[in-house]
Amino acid sequence: MASATGLDIVEVLSDEHALLRRLSRDVTEPGGDGSAFLTWSDQVVRHEIAEELVVYPALLSCHGGAAVAHSRLEEQAGIERRLVAVGRLVPGSPEFRRAAVGLVLTSLAHLETEEAQVLPILSTRIGEDRRVDLGRRYQEVTRMAPRPPAHAGARVPRGPMVVDRTEALSVWLRDMAASSGLAS
């Protein structure tokens, strides 16, 4: 529920899930060069890390939340590992396309499970003020990291990467959230 001070975590997560679904449609379109995947994966990393640092610690304190939190975190770790693997493939190649589409489908299933398991616990077992605080902290974490180039002429680099972008973004976000006191 929206309050005078902001959106609660259930609304924030619902909005974020809708955004990820919209971005996933671009990834699954044929003939992409990998730029849609870069945009989608950047948002997935922000989403998953904000959940890891803000949502799941709160869920652990709820009756019945620990098993759900552990299961979702395990699933998220698998998604992050696959993000790194897909990021190492050549954008636009058949292997990249297969892996990217498979990962998007896995991620969409993960969102469905979160909506069925996590959101009901958050909405019924955490008070409104705490949900609003979690929503604010979640949004702050997702805004922390730099964004990839958004202009139409931006191209996805070809060839092997020196540093994996997904891993670098994940570490950076975790460190910044912890040092700023946003992580639970």
Image (cartoon, rainbow, N blue to C red):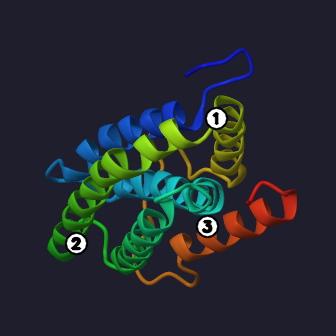
> Dot 1 lies on which element?
loop
State how far apart marks 1 and 2 are (Cα): 40 Å
> Dot 3 lies on which element?
helix
Mark 1 and mark 2 residues within 8 Å of each other at the beta carbon: no
Looking at this view, is 173 or 134 the one in front? 134
Q: Residue at x 28, y 49 (%)?
A: 112
Q: Residue at x 63, y 55 (%)?
A: 58
Q: Residue at x 85, y 64 (%)?
A: 179
> Which numbered disc, 1 or 2, marks the residue closer to the eye?
1
Looking at this view, is 176 or 184 the one in front? 184
| Picture quadrant where residue 109 is located | bottom left
Looking at this view, is 69 or 109 the one in front? 69
Mark 3 residue type: Leu
Q: Residue at x 48, y 40 (%)?
A: 13
Q: From this viewpoint, which residue is outermost toward the front?
A: 63
Mark 2 residue type: Ala
Residue 74 relative to residue 28: left or right: right
* Residue 99 image label: 2
Quadrant containing the C terminus in the rendered view: bottom right
> Dot 2 lies on which element?
helix
Mark 1 residue type: Gly
Crowding near the residue tagged with mark 3, few <14, some 14–19, many ≥20 C-alpha atoms within 10 Å = some
* Residue 169 image label: 3
On the image, the x and y values in percent for residue 83 come to: 39, 71
| Picture quadrant where residue 140 is located | top right
Q: How many marks?
A: 3
Quadrant containing the N terminus in the rendered view: top right
- The first of marks 1 and 2 along the sequence is 2
